[in-house]
Image (cartoon, rainbow, N blue to C red):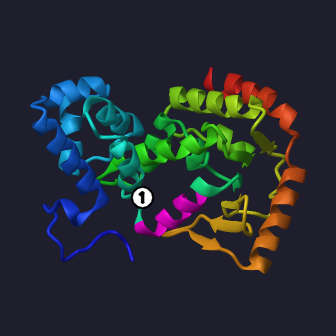
Amino acid sequence: MSVENESADPADPAWSPLKHFGSEVQLERERLGMKRAALGKAANCGYSLVAKVETGERVPTLEFAQACDRMFPHSNGRFVRLWPLALRYAFPPWFRAYVELEEKATSVRMFHPQLVPGLVQTEGYARAVLRTGRPTNLDDLVTARIERQRILTREKPTRLWLVLNEVVLRNVVGTKDVMRAQLAHLRDLAENPAHRVQIIRDNGKHHGWASPFSLLSFSEGADVVHVDGFPKGYVLAETDDVASAQDAYDLLKAMAAPPDETAELIDSITKDCYS
């Protein structure tokens, strides 16, 4: 069951976690006689964004929630605690269960044949990818995608192992400026001791895997597989499916160039394609 209730009144603050978050912000701000511009300044955003958060039209960032806790006396961290629920509302209902698993994972192994996965996209790259679907809530989708990435930089980060086809780095998404920034971000990840990035060089032969997928591991419990697809992705937990995905991922890693060659390869492609 999703958090939406089509028979409910959208003006009701209890209609969704997003509406509830915004209603609480407006209540506390008005109680203090604070202008939206003042809250916006504290949260490094504009008046209009504060207004849209308060009416449940925009998903808040973590920084916005932290600013609310700083500015509103006696909040005791309430807005940071509400924030994950509000953020989750920005994802399609079918994707929310995966996001919860991703947040709990100790390691994520990802493969994508055509695009940089959302978990490691820059804001510019994410916006260019998501815009192609002509969504009405593009800003919220971008915010949600970027906020997911906090699992890679938190105090105990989720360890990432990423395998990409070389064509992913050469296919222009957005502009050359967008691609330069995206490749620089991938290079930083490749040089981060906590993570691994490998590239399958383009030698003119197809390696046999066309579907993006991820393997998630946890401190307790068995691994699961997420398969990306259209119109919806899906999670597999059956032992045979997980074993097949693990075998496929091992083969992909074996086909890819070693991790210590990734930075040099990214530098070469950046020079050749985006200088």
Q: Position of residue 5 (x, y in %)?
A: 26, 73
| One can see residue 131 in this view | no
Image height check: is 40 above or below 144? Answer: above
Residue drawn where x is 24% and y is 28% of the image: 40
Is residue 250 left or right of 268 when viewed as pictured?
right
232 left or right of 227 in image:
left
Secondary element under disc 1, as helix, strand or loop, is loop
Q: Give the residue number, with chain letter if any, for mark 1.
A: 91
Q: Residue 176 occupies which quadrant of the picture?
A: top right
Q: Is residue 187 above or below residue 170?
A: above
Q: Residue 19: name its quadrant.
A: bottom left
In this image, 45 relative to 210: left or right? left
Specify whether 251 is left or right of 32. right
Give, as a three-letter code, the residue at label 1: Phe
The image quadrant where one finds the C terminus is top right
Q: Is residue 63 magenta?
A: no
- Image vertical order of residue 199 relative to residue 33, above or below: below
Q: Which residues are magenta?
A: 93-102
Question: Could one spot residue 157 in this view of the protein?
Answer: yes
The image quadrant where one finds the N terminus is bottom left
Residue at image location 53% in from the left, 36% down from the top: 122
Residue name at image x 27 percent, y 29 percent: 71
Q: Position of residue 184 (x, y in %)?
A: 64, 27
Dominant secondary structure (helix, strand or loop) of the stretch shown in magenta: helix
Residue 179, horizontal then vertical, whole percent = 57, 32
Front residue of this view, candidates 13 and 112: 13
Is residue 99 in the magenta section? yes
